[in-house]
Image: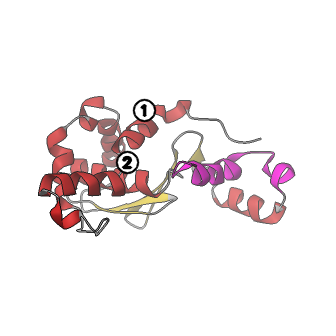
Amino acid sequence: MIADGALVNVGGRLVLGPKAEKRFGRRNFIAGRRDAFEGVLTPGRGGIEVEDGEIRWWTFAGGRINATLRHALEAVGGDWKVVPDNFMVRVRGEHLDRAAFLAALERLNDPAFWEDARLWAEVAGALPNYRLSKFQPLMPEWVEREVLGRFLLDVAGTRRWVAAGDSAEPPLG
């Protein structure tokens, strides 16, 4: 099975890779996307755009990892509003600027942050109440929250993704 962010990551590598047109065709589309991201994306963790009071972090990490990054950034950012999708994480907040965001990313690099059981229990407790199984009403509340957390979030995968940083796979090309 392909990991959640694998295909999305390939999309990011296509945009970054210098020989992507030769390898995959669709010259105009890929070249246009690459031009749009010129000066924004870097290998490893995508790139950061600061514009109109918001930060767009182009992660190309996939939905579950970006959803997990959302909760992590909200935990370290305080009043930040974080909206993830498959390709990026959009952040807004009153006390948000590039320096504060980079400081938050440094906190995410700390392995102790990802091992904070209390923090992740609170995050799991705040998740919406999805129905995943017909047996869900029979589960103790803590089991139900853990199942929801594992289905909607990927703490271990996000921790690995953050730790990979600049040593992530180089772009195609």
- The residue shown at (77%, 45%) is 18
Q: Please determine whether, in this image, residue 132 is positioned above or below residue 104.
A: below
Amino acid type, mark 1? Ala
Amino acid type, mark 2? Asp
Q: Is residue 17 magenta?
A: yes
Image location (x, y in percent) of residue 60: 54, 52
Span shown in magenta: 1-24
- The residue shown at (30%, 31%) is 110
Image location (x, y in percent) of residue 172: 72, 42
Q: Is residue 10 magenta?
A: yes
Left or right of 101 on screen, residue 137: left
Camera-near label (2 vs 1) is 2
Secondary element at image label 2: loop
- Which one is in front, 151 or 38? 151
- Which one is in front, 53 or 137? 137
Magenta stretch, main secondary structure class = helix
Quickly name the residue at label 2: 154
Whichever of labels 2 and 1 marks the residue nearer the N terminus, that label is 2
Q: Could you tell me if the residues under marks 2 and 1 are in contact, i.e. CB atoms within 8 Å?
A: no
Q: Quadrant of the C terminus?
A: top right
Residue 163 badge? 1
Secondary element at image label 1: helix
- The residue shown at (55%, 30%) is 167
